[in-house]
Amino acid sequence: MDFTLYLTLAATVGLYAVLLHHYKELLEPDLTWLEVVIGCALCLGFAAWRQRLGGSSDWHDYERGVWIAFLVGGGVIIVWQVGRFIQRQRELQRRGSEDTTALAE
């Protein structure tokens, strides 16, 4: 059951990343704090949901669930941001080679 919950968390955070990308001009830079708060709430909410669905009453189990939720949710965001970075670098390289070609002509 844990795998399914964490897969659901990854999909939810992925959709959240799509929304952040779509509404980037509206949110950044003034509402970056809200983006972080919502991301943290998603991870903590999934950890609490996991605990209520069948986690033990042991606080170690809950803490482990919180850490895994942040690793899963944060991992999705990190992969998304690294992908955006690579895309921007390729665009800069493409523009740079076009500029160099134009100067050579």
Image (cartoon, grey):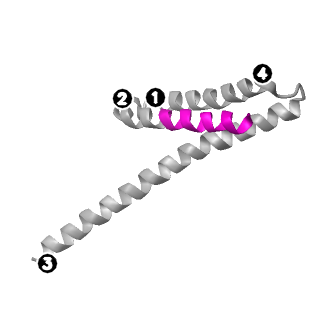
Identify the magenta region. Answer: 1-16
Callout 4: 10 Å neighbours few (<14), some, many (20+)? few
Residue at 81 percent across and 31 percent down: it is 62
Say which quarter of the image contains residue 76.
Answer: top right
Residue contact at pointers 3 and 4, CB within 8 angstroms: no
Q: Earlier in the sequence, mark 4 or mark 1?
A: 1
Task: Please determine whether, in this image, residue 54 is positioned above or below residue 7.
Answer: above
Q: Which label belongs to residue 52?
A: 4
Is the magenta region chiefly helix, strand or loop? helix
Residue at 49 percent across and 47 percent down: it is 80
Measuring from the top left, give residue 105's x and y in whole percent: 9, 77
- The amino acid type of the residue labelled 2 equals Leu
The answer for how far apart the CA atoms under marks 2 and 4 are is 36 Å
Callout 1: 10 Å neighbours few (<14), some, many (20+)? few
Which element type, helix, strand or loop, lies under badge 3? Answer: helix
Task: Please determine whether, in this image, residue 100 is positioned above or below residue 60.
Answer: below
The answer for how far apart the CA atoms under marks 3 and 4 are is 66 Å
Residue pointed to by mark 1: 31
Callout 2: 10 Å neighbours few (<14), some, many (20+)? few
Q: Earlier in the sequence, mark 2 or mark 4?
A: 2
The answer for how far apart the CA atoms under marks 3 and 2 are is 40 Å
Residue pointed to by mark 2: 26
Residue pointed to by mark 3: 104
- The amino acid type of the residue labelled 4 equals Arg
Q: Earlier in the sequence, mark 3 or mark 2?
A: 2
Measuring from the top left, give residue 63's x and y in whole percent: 81, 34
Q: Is residue 2 magenta?
A: yes
